[in-house]
């Protein structure tokens, strides 16, 4: 070791240069890996269809309120019950939504459970309805069963 400190040919400088070079290369590779992982994680967030799911849910909520009002009006002009009118109108709405989203390669299934608890009455008006919402675009599967929607007072 005594020869290394007394040596004037620059071996210590070259050795420290190699150590510094390898540490800089390792640091550059680490920074590169963090940039790549950040890119992939942000890309995965962008691929999640949160806006489509939010649009389907909000449109279904608005449509259920409108369908309820229409079912009550139709009850006065035909011999079907409010619940039967609601189910027919909701079935048409669900078919239209499925057709619209199928054009984009996405599968949307809307259904109203048939059991007696799916529609709640308050003074002969519908107050809440239950809706099953299912969304699938091939990569993401979303299901909200049941979505409880308040449609009247």
Image (tube, rainbow, N blue to C red):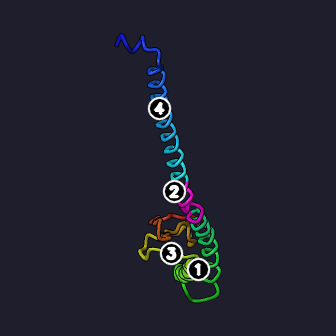
Between residues 51 and 90, which one lies in front from this camera angle? 51
Q: Earlier in the sequence, mark 3 or mark 2?
A: 2
Between residues 75 and 109, which one lies in front from this camera angle? 109
| Between marks 4 and 1 in the image, the one whose residue lies nearer the viewer | 4
Q: Does the magenta-highlighted stretch encompass residue 46?
A: yes
Q: Earlier in the sequence, mark 4 or mark 2?
A: 4
Q: Which residue is mark 4?
A: 23
- The 10 Å Cα crowd at callout 1, few under 14, some 14 to 19, many 20 or more, is few
Q: Position of residue 75 (x, y in %)?
A: 60, 83
Quadrant of the frame with the C terminus: bottom right
Q: Are marks 4 and 2 in contact (CB under 8 Å)?
A: no
Between residues 68 and 35, which one lies in front from this camera angle? 35
Q: Which residue is mark 3?
A: 107
Q: Position of residue 105 (x, y in %)?
A: 54, 76
Q: Are marks 4 and 3 in contact (CB under 8 Å)?
A: no
Residue 85 makes an appearance in the image = no
Per the model, the C-alpha gap separating discs 1 and 2 is 24 Å
Per the model, the C-alpha gap separating discs 4 and 3 is 52 Å
- The 10 Å Cα crowd at callout 4, few under 14, some 14 to 19, many 20 or more, is few
Quadrant of the frame with the N terminus: top left
Q: Is disc 3 placed on a helix, strand or loop?
A: strand
| Segment tinted magenta in the rendering | 43-53
Q: Is residue 88 above or below residue 48?
A: below
Q: Is residue 27 above or below residue 104?
A: above
Disc number placed over residue 44 in the picture, else none: 2
**Occupied quadrant, residue 73:** bottom right
Q: Residue furthest front?
A: 9
Per the model, the C-alpha gap separating discs 4 and 2 is 32 Å
Q: Position of residue 16 (x, y in %)?
A: 46, 24
Q: Are marks 3 and 1 in contact (CB under 8 Å)?
A: no
């Amino acid at each position: 070791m005594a020869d290394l400190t007394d040596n004037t040919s620059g071996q210590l400088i070259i050795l420290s240069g190699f150590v510094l070079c390898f540490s800089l290369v390792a640091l550059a590779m680490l920074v590169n890996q963090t940039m790549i992982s950040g890119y992939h994680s942000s890309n995965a967030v962008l691929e999640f269809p949160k806006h489509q799911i939010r649009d389907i849910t909000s449109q279904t909520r608005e449509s259920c309120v409108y369908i309820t009002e229409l079912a009550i009006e139709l009850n006065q002009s035909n011999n079907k019950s409010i619940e039967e009118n609601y189910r027919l109108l909701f079935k048409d709405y669900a078919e239209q939504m499925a057709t619209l989203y199928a054009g984009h390669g996405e599968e949307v299934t809307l259904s109203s459970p048939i059991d007696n608890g799916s529609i709640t009455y308050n003074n002969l008006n519908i107050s809440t309805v239950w809706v099953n919402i299912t969304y699938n675009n091939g990569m993401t599967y979303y299901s909200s069963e049941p979505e409880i929607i308040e449609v009247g007072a």
